[in-house]
Amino acid sequence: MKFRVIICFLIMISLVMPASLAGVKWTRETAYEEEGSSFCIEYGIYNPRDKDVNVDLSVTEDLQGFLDNNPGTILVNANTDDGNAVPVQLCFKTPKIYEEDCLISGILCEQSCDLDEVSYEGNVIATSSGAAGAGSGSGVSIAEAVPLQIRIKCNEHGRDYMPVYIAVLIIILIIIAIVYYKKMSPESQVIS
């Protein structure tokens, strides 16, 4: 009797357990990046089950505005362990967050980091489902979430006066060239 109960229990568990569950391997939970920069994070997708699975990698709504690429659906072969995970890169672009104080539109700017550091938190989601043509019936999708925090650095810098120095130097050179040209022109030489 006990043997029958154990067999029934094992059969029920095997029917309930999903056959299309992929795992996610990651090395970073936090990205500390400069504003306006692009960066990529590599994730590994593996499938320890005995059936191939399709995996879609996406991010939650909080991080959606930063996502710069969509890797699409990835076919992960059966019996793939985390050591042989399929590498997938998600690339992000950080927005310009901190305001610069400019004397002239876009020129002679300085940036002070008076605001607290800005960070966004969300999840990278790996949604797996059975491979196409794997069987009949309704499909089941199973997702695994990996945390991700994007922290945006503020780059404090003073005003760069180099454009002013270059403009003054160019004006001086133009004045010297005009004076020299007028001095050397035939009309300016007096015949005695």
Image: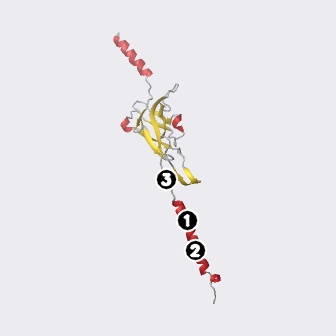
Identify the residue at horizontal 54%, vertical 49% (top origin). Answer: 100
Would you say residue 130 is visible in this rendering?
A: no
Which secondary structure, mark 1? Answer: helix
* Residue at the extreme top: 1
Identify the residue at horizontal 45%, vertical 36% (top origin). Answer: 148
- The tag on residue 158 is 3
- Three-letter amino acid code of the residue under disc 2: Ala
* Residue at the extreme bottom: 192
Pinpoint residue 115: horizontal percent, then vertical percent.
50, 42
Say which of marks 2 and 3 sits in front.
3
Give the residue number, with chain letter if any, for mark 1: 168
Pinpoint residue 113: horizontal percent, then vertical percent.
49, 45
Q: Which of marks 1 and 3 precedes in the sequence?
A: 3
Q: Nearer the viewer, residue 40 or 148?
A: 148
Contact between marks 2 and 1 (CB within 8 A): the answer is no
Tell me the distance, in whole angstroms, between the alpha carbons under discs 2 and 3: 34 Å
Q: Which of marks 3 and 2 precedes in the sequence?
A: 3
Identify the residue at horizontal 42%, vertical 18% (top origin). Answer: 12
Tell me the distance, in whole angstroms, between the alpha carbons under discs 3 and 1: 20 Å
Q: Look at the image and tell me in which quarter the C terminus lies.
A: bottom right
Pinpoint residue 5: horizontal percent, then vertical percent.
37, 12
Which secondary structure, mark 2? Answer: helix
- The tag on residue 177 is 2
Above or below, comparing residue 169 to residue 72 in the picture: below
Tell me the distance, in whole angstroms, between the alpha carbons under discs 2 and 1: 14 Å
- Three-letter amino acid code of the residue under disc 1: Val
Q: Look at the image and tell me in which quarter the N terminus lies.
A: top left
Question: Tell me, what colour scheme is on the image?
Answer: secondary structure
* Residue at the extreme right: 187
Which secondary structure, mark 3? Answer: loop
